Amino acid sequence: MHVDQTNLPGEPAGKFGDRGIKYEEDVTRTDETWFRLLQWTQGQAPSERLAAQVLAYSGFNDIDPSHPLGGKDGGRDAICSKDGRPWIMAVYFPRDQQPFNVIKSKFESDLAGAAKHQPYGLAFVTNQELRLSERANLKELGAGKDVTIDLFHLERVAHVLDEPSMSPVRKQYLDIDPGPLPIAVELDILGSARRFVGSEEVLDWWLEHAPEKERQRHVRSRQEHVQNPISALRLLPMQPPAPTPLTKTELEQRIERWERRVRQAWTESEDHLAATAWPGLRFRLRNTGEVFLNDVQAIITIEGVRGLQYLHRDRFEQAKLLPPVFPARRDPYAWVEPGFYDDLRIADYPVTWKNLDDSVEITLDLRHLRPHPVWESEADDIVLVHSGDIGGTEVAARWTVTAQGYGEVHEGEVRTIPVEPVSFLDSLEEVSGGDEPSDE
């Protein structure tokens, strides 16, 4: 667009625009759909076919046009249904904006014809602007005849036609080139976020139970040491002497330090159980467009949760969940399976994630996303722990998609993930095979 000159005397304002600005002929209007609908010149038949496409997009079914090319239609441009109820479609597409009394007269005529067939509703599709008061006026006319009115006025029809999936219809009836087909991707998040129920009760039980067991052992150990002092001697040259039992004061100091560590690390203990007992999320991406997408990246942000690396059930260690007062001595010659295998990933594995402030960001990187088949992650990658309000029943997941050749970001509809309360004891039973927590 550039300013050329203002309107000369006697020239119509439309040549240079209302503000005296001349527009280049190749400038695309942002309201092109709206403008071409209002300046409709194609006649009745295309308008009825276009209206049928608008209704189909809006949830109407079984659309059966009467006589778009002319003929008696008995007051019905088309019959259709919605939610199992019968509807009638009426279409009014004149050129330019008409006075409301003209629109109302046409509507009353269509309503009278439709009412003869006793439909549930009348869908009135028009290229005319209707103010809120005018819409209310027309709906009142329908109420007088016990007919529900659904008004598809100019702004609403333009909005429907500007939807990305309606670009072929826009091209066919309005000759508006859609340009590159938009990104059309659907995301499914399979799984849930979880939170423990009964965790504090287990913690309190362990803080009381484990020290009491150690106090009983301490009494027995002291008695054995007194009754059999030779047991503390080395019987073999390489054999270390048996440790001298702690005094009662030393034992209580040890228990006090242990209790502080257990309380401070309880969240980590819960996380270990959750990572081994709970299933992880899985993801499904579906390309619903008509083009192959390359170098696709979907970024999913889930609020109010923490992420944990999923661990196989075999990785559960009771000592990490309920640490004993005195850890068991490890055999220095015993093989200890390294835990770094938990973090290994296949090369170019498409799912990565990281914890942010009270949210998790998950990234899906796909080389290609074809219209078929649907892509789905193959493993339980991330376990979600709900970290928000204890009464919350769901968390929100926002997501975007970018792809090679597209300069814009596709923002998907917000997904909700259910939050499930899970019994701490039930989770412990799953990973421990039903055994009671051991003191050893």
Image (cartoon, rainbow, N blue to C red):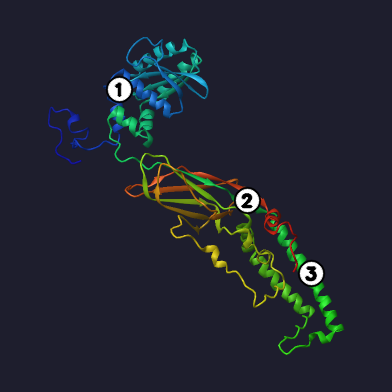
Q: Nearer the viewer, residue 107 or 189?
A: 189
Q: Residue furthest bottom?
A: 237
Query: Which image quarter holds the N terminus?
Result: top left
Q: Nearer the viewer, residue 367 or 362?
A: 367
Residue 312 pos. (x, y %): 60, 59
| Quadrant assignment, res 325 | bottom right
Q: Earlier in the sequence, mark 3 or mark 1?
A: 1
**Circle 2 — which element?**
loop
Query: Which dot, 3 or 1, sits closer to the camera?
Result: 3
Q: Which residue is pictured at 42% across the width and 39% down the height?
A: 288
User: Would you place residue 13 above or below residue 205 in this image?
Assistant: above
Which residue is disc 2 drawn over? Answer: 390
Determine the CA span between mark 3 and mark 1: 89 Å
- Residue 106 pos. (x, y %): 37, 14
Residue designated by label 1: 97
> Sequence order check: which comes first, mark 2 or mark 1?
1
- Helix, strand or loop at mark 1: loop
Tell me the kind of residue under disc 1.
Gln
Horizontal side, residue 206 vs residue 270: left or right? right
Q: Are marks 2 and 3 in contact (CB under 8 Å)?
A: no
Q: Quadrant of the C terminus?
A: bottom right
The amino acid type of the residue labelled 2 equals: Ile
Badge 3 vs badge 1, beta-carbon distance below 8 Å: no
Distance from disc 2 to disc 3, alpha carbons, whole Å, reads 34 Å
Q: Which mark is residue 213?
A: 3
Near mark 2 (Cα within 10 A), the count class, few <14, some 14-19 or many ≥20, is: few
| Kind of element beneath mark 3 | helix
Q: Residue at x 48, y 44 (%)?
A: 414
* Label 2 vs label 1, nearer the camera: 2
Q: Examine the rendered structure and indicate whether residue 183 appears above or below residue 134.
A: below
> Residue shown at 83%/86% (left/top)?
229
